[in-house]
Amino acid sequence: MSRSAASSTTAIDASQPAAPSSAAMPVLQPSRVPPPPMPKDPGAIIGPTRWRLFKYHILAAILRFACAIAPLYTLHKLKFGFPKGIRVQKTKLPSRDRRRKIKAYIFKPAENNALYQARLKEGNGKIPVHINMHGSGFVLPVLGSDCDFCAMLADELGIVVIDSDYRKGPVHAFPAALQDVEDVVKYVQKQPEYLSSKISLGGFSAGGNVALSAACTLNFEARNARPTSDSTSSSSNGTAKPNETPASVITAVSTLYPACDLTVPPWMRKPTPQSAYDCGIVLPAWAIRFFHGSYCQIPEHYSDWRASPVRADENLFPPHVFIACGDADKLYDGAEKLMERLHGAGHPDAVFLALPRMSHGWDKVASPGKPGWEERLSSYKGFLDCIRRGLGDDSAKRVD
């Protein structure tokens, strides 16, 4: 068994303290249940001051300019190419704000793709949809950086893949990004050509954060019949109604190195299991503070379960969840903590793939035959298999 495969599960120690109860999470009616207290130690999270927020805006503008003149994702696309026959459409999808559209790329399999035709037949002319959110640190405008990955998903799974943009900080703070993902899902649900009962979400880094959060907020909204992200207050505890097990709005969510816990300041994060790494990049403390502070500009937002999905009620997650993260990544602890909570709650299909000596974004820089390539292949396989299980494909059933 490979080293990465051997690390694909996380043992759950029953002696560990129980996960925080939903009553300790933010609620929609602050008068009923107060928000959780903020940390009292010297490293407590504080929102960015006006001066720091001004610096965030300047730095974000510089980074956006750099992304505009050096679109590295185009080189990445040319390096790996698209599967033959893949159809790509650049479009703009409606948002809750009629004056604003959400940019997106829609990837469709080749017309002669046998699996695509089989899924169309199975869905009576309707096709399942996967919605992808790129990594961005909640700041970088790099829609298209996952174009080769989305094309591969469409070809391998025989489904439509929407690579969706979302608003970025510090110009658009929490919950703007989350709202955009919700809007794209609701758009898909209304389209006659899409199979609304088989929608999956996925993403990388910050995109993984909003994918996990959107899956929970959509379920919360469906089960409570009220909106969850229109208010910017630390609002809802994300608790499903008792004795209620409605179908999940989202069938599966697959993520790579998602930001699951924004409540822990970068200088207070636990050391990663591995200090040395073979592939990827190291996120310095100042970068984490900049990225998270650009998204959550009010202290209470860090602990809102819609910003930190590790705080969401376990029953709100889709029936199939996959997370892959390198053990040299600063985001590893939050991802592991979320999976421990899901396992402890008896989630039916929560898979955590821990990748030894991989740091952040290793899959984006790995090359064939070099460190990180086998980990890229294994994590992408786990990503696809989770979506397949959400689609009901027997070939992707877990063997425990």
Image (cartoon, rainbow, N blue to C red):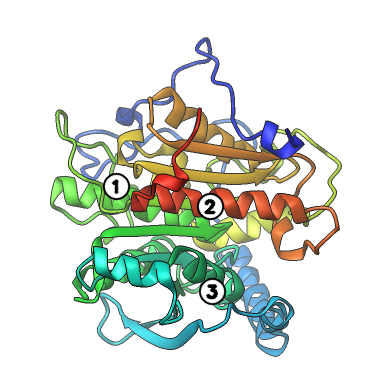
Q: CA distance from mark 1 to mark 3?
A: 37 Å
Helix, strand or loop at label 2? It is: helix
Q: Nearer the viewer, residue 329 or 227?
A: 329
Helix, strand or loop at label 1? It is: loop
- Circle 2 residue: 383
Q: Is residue 357 left or right of residue 128?
A: right
Q: Is residue 361 visible?
A: yes
Quadrant in the picture for residue 356: top right
- Circle 1 residue: 235
The residue located at (38%, 70%) in the rendering is 116
Circle nearer the viewer, 1 or 3: 3
**Which circle marks residue 213 in the picture?**
none
**Which circle marks residue 151 in the picture?**
3
Quadrant in the picture for residue 78: bottom right
Residue type beneath disc 1 = Ser
The residue located at (31%, 53%) in the rendering is 250
Q: Is residue 159 visible?
A: no
The residue located at (17%, 45%) in the rendering is 223
